[in-house]
Amino acid sequence: MSIFKAIVGFGLVFSSLSAFAIDQGNIEKSVQLKDGSTVHQFKDGKMAMESKFGRPYRMKDGEVMETTNGKSIAMKGDEVARLSNAIRSHMRP
């Protein structure tokens, strides 16, 4: 049972590290969601969604998401282009 917990813990840490690696200058915080995706909140309060595969995608303003710890977050804005630029700039050599 403890090996299972270690694997799950490593998975959560790894996924959150990849979220924080993206352009920390503009992203204030990143939260892992229950479905494996990540919501990123920029310093101005607007948000963007990243799929569990690392791709930005659209979400309606005000749509409610559930975090891995069971809390609810309402989407504010839809900063797909901003997140796409942050990911692209992170991937450049």
Image (spheres, rainbow, N blue to C red):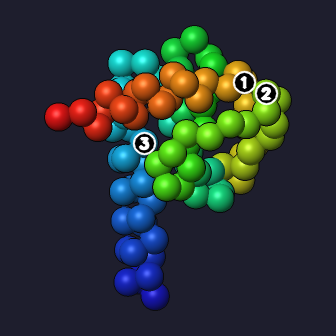
State how far apart marks 2 and 3 are (Cα).
21 Å
Please report whichever mark, 1 or 2, sits nearer to the chain's N-terminal start. 2
Amino acid type, mark 1:
Lys
Where is residue 33? Give x, y as percent. 62, 51
Mark 1 secondary-structure assignment: loop
Picture coordinates of residue 7 (x, y %)?
Answer: 39, 75
Q: Distance of mark 1 from mark 3, alpha carbons?
A: 18 Å
Of tags 2 and 3, the one toward the viewer is: 2
Q: Amino acid at mark 3?
A: Ala
Question: Which residue lies most toward the top here?
Answer: 44
Give x and y (percent) for residue 78. 67, 26
User: What SS does tag 3 mark?
Assistant: helix
Q: Residue at x 37, y 65 (%)?
A: 10
Numbered badge on residue 19: 3
Are discs 1 and 3 less than 8 Å apart at CB?
A: no
Answer whether labels 1 and 2 touch (C-beta < 8 Å): yes
Please indicate whether residue 75 sits to the left or right of residue 93 in the image: right
Q: Which residue is mark 2?
A: 61
Q: Residue at x 45, y 59 (%)?
A: 12
Residue at numbered disc 1: 76
Residue at x 82% of width, y 29% of height:
62
